[in-house]
Image (spheres, grey):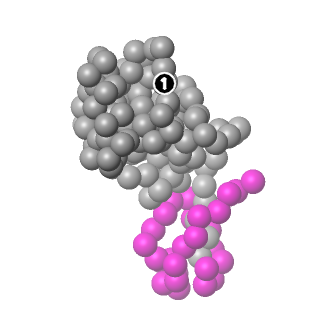
Amino acid sequence: MEVLDSSAFIHGYDSDDRTASIPAVQSELTSETALRFDAEEGAGMHIHVPDEGAVGRVRRAAGETGDLAELSDTDVRLLAAAFELDATLVTDDYAMQNVAQRMDVPVHVIARDGIDDEREWRFQCVGCGRTFDENRDRCPVCGSDLSRKNPA
C-alpha cells in the first residue's frame, strides 16, 4: 500500500498498488489536483484518519531528528498514516523523508531526488553561537533567533 502526499496528486502520480491518503491532503489541493484526489478516491483509495497515538509517535520522532518545526499537521498525520498502515509514503518533502527514515517507513519520491541519509539537526543561536539539540523560539542565553544546522 502507498500513502499519497499532495505532491502525488500535483505531479499526476499513478500507482498499480493500493493507495491511501488523509482528509487534510484533499483540503490542500485546488482545481485539477483536487479532481485527481476525487478520482483516486472513486477508484478505491482508502481515506485514513490516524489515531492520536501514532501522531504522537511521529511528533516524538520529528523532535528527535529536529524536523518537527518543518512539518505541518498534515505532514505529521500522513507519516502517522503510513506508519499505522505499514505502507510506503509517497512524498517529495525532505523533512518527511527524514522522519520516515527514523521510523523505518519506506518512502517513494516522485519529482525530486530523495534523501540519502537521516539527519539529526542541531540549532545554533545567530547571536552568541551556542548550539542546542532541540528547537526553541529564542536562545535561552542571549534571546537571539536560532537557525537549523546540519551537524555533519
Q: What range is drawn magenta here?
A: 126-152
Dominant secondary-structure state across the stretch colored magenta = loop
Frontmost residue, 96 versus 42: 42
Q: Which residue is depicted at the point 49% across and 30% down? A: 13
Q: Position of residue 14 (x, y in %)?
A: 48, 24
Q: Residue at x 48, y 20 (%)?
A: 15
Residue 78 sits above or below residue 15 on the image: below
| x then y, percent, for residue 142 | 53, 85
| Secondary structure beneath label 1 | loop
Residue 23 counted in the magenta span: no
- Residue 5 x %, y %: 42, 37
The percent position of residue 54, horizontal first and vertical second, equals 33, 33
Q: Amino acid at mark 1?
A: Asp
Residue beneath disc 1: 14
Q: In the figure, 86 relative to 73: above or below? A: above
Q: Is residue 64 left or right of residue 83?
A: right
Whether residue 133 is visible here, answered yes or no, is yes
Furthest-right residue in this view: 152
Nearest the camera: 85 or 37?
37
Residue 142 left/right relative to 69: right
Check the image and report above or below for 59 versus 41. Answer: below
